[in-house]
Amino acid sequence: MEKILFRSTNRQAPEVSFKEALLKGQAPDYGLYVPTRIPHLDSEEISKFVGIPYYEVAFRIIRIYIPEEDIPTSILYDLCKQAYNFPVPIEKIDKNLFLLYLDKGPTASFKDFAARLMARLMNYVASIENKNLLILVATSGDTGGAVADAFFGLNNINVVILFPEKEVTGRQRKQMTTLGGNICAIAVKGTFDDCQAIVKRAFNDPALRHKNLTSANSINFGRLLPQTVYYFKAYCEMGSEKIGFSVPCGNFGNLMAGVLAREMGVPIERFIVAVNENDEFPKFLKTGIYKPVVPSKKCSSNAMNVGHPSNLARLIDLYGGWLTDERDAQGRVIRKGVLKKSPDINLMRKHFVSFSINEKIVDTTIKEFYEKYGIIIEPHGAVSVAAALLANLEIPICCFETANPAKFPEKIRQILGIEPPVPECLARLDNIKENFVIIENNYDKFVESIL
């Protein structure tokens, strides 16, 4: 099998192996790594995924990208089996409406699917190469908790998580701030985009080079790749030749994983790109003009409060365009989201339809979904469902429940007047002491806090 290499979306950095892309996170030219070729599985190969365990599907897909000399087959198989030891249910809700529950992992979030395997891959590679890594993560909600849980206690890795002080729920915050050990949590007086800008700048800071920095955000292809697996699994469970997905989007990693799955052979006819009031993508799809939402808007679907999604650079690259940030000589962003080359926007319009869902529609969707089906969905799931209903496509559509409703008790209480059932993994957090620091939205203050 021909080895798959990875290039930068900015096309000014050398091609690297999967292992190098995993450890670097971001390319030295500030671009994101994408595969130089995308392998394709035919329908017969994909049909073999029907009825087998989730971890087995994950192993077969991940194996394609990681050569034997980087991670031996037996070890990769064990890592997948360890990572995916929880159920991945999908439920048919109505004639053409399915709901994929991605909240059954240890932190009750779909971020577990990427973080748990990524942590094991990174830890294996770091131990083999005798390296100590410092993982930097920006989170708007669930990524931080999933990464903290996945990397906690690993000998070769320390983790620093940045989150916007006022934009995460109490339980989301506690998932990041109660572990200690090799997990350090920092609250930033700003937005998620501010946190993300700090992380991106740090990767190319000479003063931090000795720290062996890498990312566990979806700018790292090693976190993106595991998410392709549930698209394969959902397709196999849905039992239809033509399907669509209504993808709740923040940093667009979830969508990019789906696009990768489609390129690999899953017959996805349409993606419904579901965003909250941070509506830069539906506007771009309509006009062909990209304009980030600055500052990002605060919505209850907080993992989607992203005004300039990192993974748009990958998506636009796939369609022949080039999206990047303009920087000064010190690497500071002076202009976000510059479209240096337009993608094939007409082709994108054939593959994607996009809707911005406001808070009023979120509330109505949560209420009506519960009244009609007896199922509690949280704000991100509500954005997914609402967009699917607006799209009204005549094919089976899979929506995503990306987090447990118990992470948003105030919202559920306000709309439904009931307390959502609390899984044990969240209930145990309520009486644990937190430990985190608060900093201004200032890069130098961040550097001081980690040196």
Image (spheres, rainbow, N blue to C red):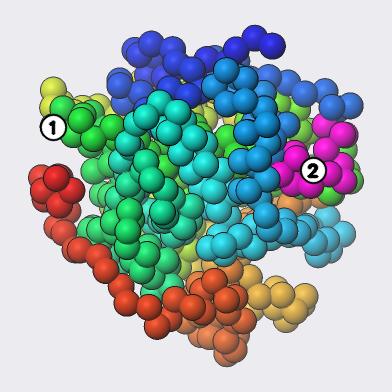
- What are the residue bounds of the magenta stretch? 46-57
Taking depth in this image into account, of 124 and 381 the one nearest to the observer is: 124
Q: Is residue 261 visible?
A: no
Q: Amino acid at mark 2?
A: Tyr
Is residue 391 found inside the magenta-colored segment of the image? no
Q: Tell me what residue is drawn at x 35 percent, y 23 percent.
A: 27
Taking depth in this image into account, of 234 and 339 the one nearest to the observer is: 234
Label 1, on which residue? 207
Taking depth in this image into account, of 85 and 294 the one nearest to the observer is: 85
Q: Label 2: how many residues lie within 10 Å, few (<14), some (14-19) or many (20+)?
A: many
Q: Position of residue 132 (x, y in %)?
A: 32, 36
Taking depth in this image into account, of 428 and 344 the one nearest to the observer is: 428
| Residue 427 higher or lower than 93, as above or below | below
Is residue 49 found inside the magenta-colored segment of the image? yes
Q: Amino acid at mark 1?
A: Ala
On the rendered structure, is 197 left or right of 249?
left
Q: Position of residue 29 (x, y in %)?
A: 30, 20
Corner quadrant of residue 55: top right
Q: Tell me what residue is drawn at x 25 percent, y 61 percent.
A: 187
Label 2, on which residue? 235
